[in-house]
Amino acid sequence: MLFHSTRGKDKNKTFEQVLMQGLADDGGLFMPDLWPSVDIERMKTFDSYIDVAKYIVPMFTDSSYAKDEVLQVLDNTWHNFECKHLIEINNLDDKNFVLELFHGPTLAFKDFGLQLAAAFFNKTLESQNKTAVVFGATSGDTGSAAIDACKEFKSIKSFILIPEGNMSSVQRKQMTTVDKSNIFPILADGTFDECQDIVKRGFKERSFISNDQYLLAINSINWIRIIGQICYYFYATLKINKFDQPINFSVPTGNFGNVFACYAASRMGMPLSKIIVAVNSNDILHRFFKQNDYSKRKVIETISPSMDISVASNFERLVYDFYLDSDSAKCRKLYSNFPEEPINIDDNIWSKTENLFLSYTCNDEETFECMKNFSNKFNQLIDPHTAVAYEAVERLKDQLHHNTVILATAHPAKFPDVLLKAGLNLKDMPERLKRVLNKKEVAESLSTSDNSIFDYIRKNN
Ligand SMILES: *Cc1c(COP(=O)(O)O)cnc(C)c1O
C-alpha cells in the first residue's frame, strides 16, 4: 500500500516516508492509494482493541515493514492505561453508549494516535540509526500526549510550544512537570495561531536541526494518528453490536482527525449510519454541513479548548475522498485560494452530505447546562468536549435510528475550573493527575516575535 497527496503531486510514498514527513510536499494531506477492506466475519472473533489493531495497522504498513515486525511493535505500543481493555464502554440506556477514550496516561483520546506514532518513529530511527526533533504547538491535549508518548525514546527530543491563554492549568502542568532530559516545554508569549506560525517557519527553514536528523510533526494531519483511531471505531462497533447493525457516532470535533478516522473505518467496511460532527462556537464545520459554507473566521475561546480552531486541517481529506471522488486536480484548485476564499463545493455534490453527516454547534452556556443535566440524569461527570457531543445527540435524536455512540475524548478531571463553574463536584481525582498537580513546573519562557525559540532548540539539540 502506497500513499499519495490530496493535491496530487506528491505520490508513491511508502508508509515510513509518510510517517516521517507528515504533510505532503505540495501542501496536501496523505491518503492511502486505496481503501483496504476488512473481513467482518473474521473481526467478529476479536476481543480486544489490540486484536483489532493487529489486523488493521498492517494493512497500511506493508510498504515498509514485514507483518511480524509490526505485530511485535503493537504488542508494546499502548501503555500506562488505567483499564485492562484500554477503553471502557458505558451504557447510558438501551440506545446510547459512551466510548471512554480517556483512560490513557494523559487522560485524553490523543494517547491512541500518538503512542502509535511514537512507536513507529522510534522503530524507524533505530533502523536508520538517526535521531529526531519533535516540534509542535498545542492548544491542549496534543502536546501532553506527544510528550508522554515520546519521553522514553532517547533518539527523540520534544520541543512543545505552549501558548498563553486558554488551556486548563491541568493540561499545562501535564507538560511542564515531566522532568526528562529529552523533553522541552516552552511557554510562548503568543496565541496558538502565532505558535503555529513559528512551527510552520521552523519546518520551512529547518535551521536548528542537522542534515541527517528528522524534524517530526505531531499535529493531527499525520496519517499514523488516523490509523490508531480507526481501530477504536471498529472496536466499539464490535463490542456494541458485533457489526450486525449500522451505528451512529457523535464526535466532539476540532481538526476533524477523529471524524475522518470514523469515515475511514466505514470506507473499510464498518457498518455506519450517521456521523454527528459536534462543534463548539467555532462552527466552520457546522456551517459547512448545514449550508455549504466553509469560510474561515476568527477563533473564539471556549470551555472546550481542544476544539478551538478556525479551520479544520483534516477536512481536506473528506473533501478529496467524499465530495471530489479523489480528483486531486479539483482539490488543489479548491484549496489554492483557501482560506482567503472559502471552499465552494458544487451544491449538487454537496447534497450527498445528508447521507452520512449531521452536525450541531453548542456554545459555552449550553455546554455548562449539558454537563449539569448529564450529572443529574446519570450521576456521572463528563468533560466539556464530551458534553458538546452528548448535547448534539440530545438535539438530533429524532433523526437518529440505530444505536448511538458518544465519544468521550477527555477525562472531566482535566477541567477542574469548568466543573467548578458548572457547580459540579469531582469526587475522585485520578492518581496520575494528583501527582502532576503537586509537582514543580519547569518550562522555558520565550518570545514568538524573534528567533529565541529557534536559538533555544539549536542550543539544546
Ligand atoms: C483534540 C481533541 C478534540 C478534537 O479532535 P479532532 O480530531 O481534532 O477533531 C476533541 N476533544 C478533545 C478532548 C481533544 O483533545
Image (cartoon, rainbow, N blue to C red):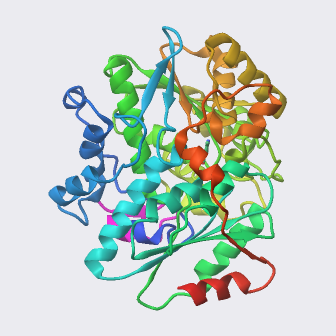
Say above or below: 165 vs 231. below
Give the image location of residue 233, x and y in percent. Answer: 42, 34
Q: What secondary structure do most residues of the magenta stretch adopt?
A: loop
Residue 14 appears in view? no
Q: Quadrant of residue 455?
A: bottom right
Q: Magenta span has 9?
A: yes
Residue beneath the point at 79% across and 63% down: 191
Say above or below: 326 vs 387. below
Q: Nearer the viewer, residue 218 or 334?
A: 218
Q: Which residues are magenta?
A: 1-18
Judge left or right: residue 257 versus residue 449.
left
Give the image location of residue 443, x and y in percent. Answer: 67, 70
Q: Quadrant of residue 207?
A: bottom right
Residue beneath the point at 48% across and 65% down: 8
Q: Quadrant of residue 50?
A: top left
Give the image location of residue 278, x and y in percent. Answer: 66, 33
Q: Nearer the viewer, residue 386 or 363?
A: 386
Q: Magenta span has 266?
A: no
Residue beneath the point at 83% across and 48% down: 300
Residue 428 appears in view? yes
